Image (cartoon, grey):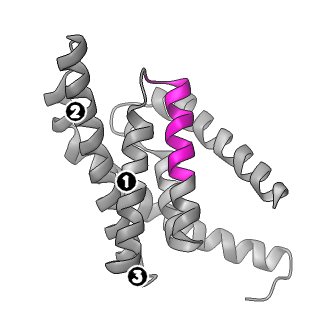
Amino acid sequence: MIFRAVLSAIALFIAVLIEDAFVSALPEPLNLIAVVFTIGVLLFHFVKPHYGAAWLVAGGAALDLVALPGPSRTVAYALAALLGLFLARKVFSNRSLYALLGLGVSMFAGAIIVESIWYEVLRLIVSEPVAFSALLQAFWTRLLTFAITVFVAYFLSRRSVVFFQKLFFLRT
């Protein structure tokens, strides 16, 4: 149990490091890839929804510690995790690619909307210039980038599971 928690913390640290240091330095459409959120959605789909929810909340908190002022991603990812828990049980209960895409895109759209509302409230309270319209203009671009990322990650994760099963002689 403790070994799995330590392993998860190390994996979360690596994912946050990749998203914050590497992906954010890429050109425009590629810097919108949400590595931590993608892994959380894959955990929702492949492992258990509770693991994915815990990953999203911890990942949002970790991203807020290294990148943005205020708990914007923590709140957005936590509310997306709640939405995902509901959707994984009631709407997208089967384990197909379409269910994964529907679950992931719904959760990510919720997270984007909550994050945009957070920045608008922050702008009203602190009177800082936050481009709310720019956040919503990038909505469809971020959503499409996320859908493509989840699609690619789905096939990479399926291939990697088969590879490691053959490598370590595991039964399917």
Residue at image coords 83%, 74%: 167
Segment colored magenta: 55-68
Where 24 falls versus 60 (above or below)? Answer: above
Disc 2: CA contacts within 10 A as few (<14), some (14-19) or many (>=20): some
Report whether residue 128 is seen: no
Quadrant occupied by the N terminus: bottom right
- Mark toward the start of the polypeptide (3 vs 1): 1
Which picture quadrant has residue 121? top left
Which mark is on residue 149? Answer: none
Residue denoted by label 2: 135
In this rendered view, identify the residue nearer to me: 136 or 4. Answer: 4
Kindly report which numbered mark, 2 or 1, lies closer to the viewer in this rendering. 1
Which mark is on residue 80? Answer: 1
Badge 1 element = helix
Badge 2 element = helix
- Dot 3 amino acid type: Ser
- Dot 2 amino acid type: Leu
Q: Main secondary structure of the magenta part?
A: helix
Disc 1: CA contacts within 10 A as few (<14), some (14-19) or many (>=20): many
Report whether residue 44 is seen: yes
Q: Position of residue 52 (x, y in %)?
A: 54, 60
Which mark is on residue 93? Answer: 3
- Mark toward the start of the polypeptide (2 vs 1): 1
Q: Position of residue 8 (x, y in %)?
A: 71, 52
